[in-house]
Image (cartoon, rainbow, N blue to C red):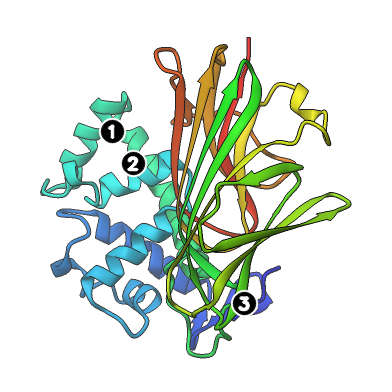
Amino acid sequence: MDNRGALWYNPDNRFLGGLYMDKQTRKDLIDDLIYLRKDAGFVPWRLEAATVFNEIVGGQERDFDTLKLRLNSAINTLDLGDAEALRVAYGLLPDYAYLETLKTRREIYGERIGKKYDSLADRENAAIRELALALLNARYTTSPLPAEAPAMHNAALQERVEILTVVRDRLWLETRNYFRLIPLIEGAEYLEISSSIPAIITGTNEEVVVKTVTMPNGKIHRFHYKEPLKRGQPVELFYTMNPDVDKDDTYEYALLEECRAFHEPTFSFRVEVVFLGVKPAYAWSYKQLPFFSRPGIPKEGQAIDVSDTSIATAEFSDLYGGLFSGIAWRWD
């Protein structure tokens, strides 16, 4: 159980930020989310009546742009297909933003993905129940912090993470990494990234010196900057990883996935895999899976078509909790 900033005292009640979260509150929030889906969708002039939504999602900030950002962020915690269906329903996607009725948005979207109207409605309703839990638990990246909550313990926020991996004839060849982070503590001397891969690190920033510590189960790479990092001031890090063939023989086995575990809150993540020579039979993306559950079973909306290309790409938003997201594939 995660008890940061929250007091749980039975499964049906929660105290958060001065609000008493009980079954009725959840029901009222779901009712607000259903109301905000109707007619023109999530637009400023319909928000006033959604009092519980405003209180939980808005906190002390009630401007429309903030509420829209937080709603989008909470939707990002859902399954990819459910998230898209809700963005259509609320009119949050550009192609659907100016359609005046929910009926029209559903009909156009249903025709595009080959789903019937009633099937979409059922999917939205189930997704809204999950969305309400995400909002009540405040487990999305841009959630408002209650006044009573302690400061988050994370050392940094990750605005952007990008990795590009090259696979040649089924074997790992190289991975290029890029991070843009916002330190949350003042005066940190280095960034630390742990890895179970005994790789060689090259190509770092000019102002960075990397020091690697070998551990029983992997390596810790510490990237030391010339000046201590400043709280709130974004910093970039990039480096390349290549196989250390003299120290590990696992590089002789076919690679089956590329992923990262996100222990720090991360706004956006892009993973790209380039296949040289042999291409996989099929590939798919997965999001927020525990270590032993990855790479999961491909679901609707997760397939990546590599039939006419040698590159597989996936984009993710709002990652956290030490869970894994990435791309997996199967060879013939």
Cα–Cα span, label 1 and label 2 = 6 Å
Q: Closest to the observer: 187 or 208?
A: 208
Q: Residue flagged by tag 2: what amino acid is it?
A: Ala
Residue drawn at (45%, 62%) of the image: 132
* For the residues bearing labels 1 and 2, Cβ distance under 8 angstroms: yes
Residue 202 lies, in percent from the top left, at 61, 46
Tag 1 secondary structure: helix
Tell me the residue that label 1 is attached to: 117
Q: Mark 2 points at which residue?
A: 121
Quarter of the picture holding the C terminus = top right
> Residue 198: x and y, percent?
76, 42
Are the residues flagged by discs 1 and 3 in contact, CB closer than 8 Å?
no
Front-most of residues 240 and 105: 240
Kindly identify the residue that appears in the image at 68 percent across and 47 percent down.
Answer: 290
Q: Name the residue under label 3.
A: 153
Secondary structure under the numbered disc 3 in the rendered image? loop
Vertical order, 113 against 135 (above or below): above
Reply above or below: 181 against 19: above
Please, what secondary structure does the residue beneath circle 2 have?
Answer: helix
Kind of residue at disc 1: Tyr
Q: What label does residue 314 carry, if any? A: none
Q: In which quarter of the image is the N terminus?
A: bottom right
Measuring from the top left, give residue 144's x and y in whole percent: 42, 77
Q: Nearer the viewer, residue 147 or 322?
A: 322
